[in-house]
Image (spheres, rainbow, N blue to C red):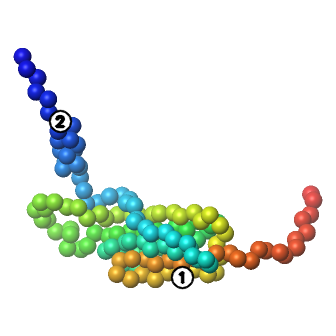
Amino acid sequence: MTIRFDPFCNFNKINKFFEEFPSGYNEEYLLKTDYSEGENNFYLDVEIPGVKKEDVKIKLENNILIVSGEKKIPVNENQKKNYLRKERNYGTFKRSFMFQSAVNPDECTANFENGVLFISIGKLTKKNNKERVININ
């Protein structure tokens, strides 16, 4: 009895798994982002193709920026079609970014152009030197 060695045996099983895996509507997917730092600002370029800017929310709280929203299934996608392959993602998305140094929530801008969200957040340059009396209870 001879046993043949098949080096692609596991590879073929993995391919079969992904071919059978349902695609199209994912509950959540990761946003691809370029994150950089300048002298006075942090910059984020977030790819969100196929999403309207009204469907995107940006929140900055405690040095954490949260970008969230939903990519909705187009109206014509609800029609019965005989898909040979369906690779586009739909559903909710949410991504958080924590900054290494303090940011100024009053110095934030966001622009949305051609499926890319451009965010600029100013660094907090002045320290709060206000004096505060703390009462002992």
Q: Position of residue 100 (x, y in %)?
A: 62, 64
Q: Secondary structure at mark 2?
A: loop
Q: Quadrant of the N terminus?
A: top left
Residue reaching furthest to the right = 136
Q: Amino acid at mark 1?
A: Thr
Which disc number belongs to residue 7?
2
**Residue holding disc 1:** 109
Q: Is residue 37 above or below residue 91?
A: below
- Of the numbered discs 2 and 1, the one sitting upstream in the chain is 2
Density class for disc 2 (Cα within 10 Å; few <14, some 14-19, many ≥20) is few
How many labels sit on residues? 2
Apparent side of residue 62 relative to residue 80 in the rendered image (left or right): right
User: Residue 41: x percent and y percent?
Assistant: 59, 77
Kindly tell me whether residue 13 is visible in this rendering: no
In the visual, does 125 lie left or right of 87?
right
34 over 1 or under it: above or below: below
Which residue occupies the foreground of this view, 54 or 45?
Answer: 45
Task: Determine the residue positioned at 54% across, 78% down.
Answer: 120
**Residue at horizontal 92 percent and vertical 57 percent from the top:** 137
Q: CA distance from mark 2 to mark 1?
A: 53 Å
Horizontally, residue 121 falls left or right of residue 9, namely right
Assess disc 1: are there few (<14), some (14-19) or many (≥20) residues with their C-alpha within 10 Å of its C-alpha.
few
Q: Are marks 2 and 1 in contact (CB under 8 Å)?
A: no
* Residue type for callout 2: Pro
Classify mark 1: helix, strand or loop: strand
Q: Residue at x 37, y 60 (%)?
A: 29
Label at residue 75: none
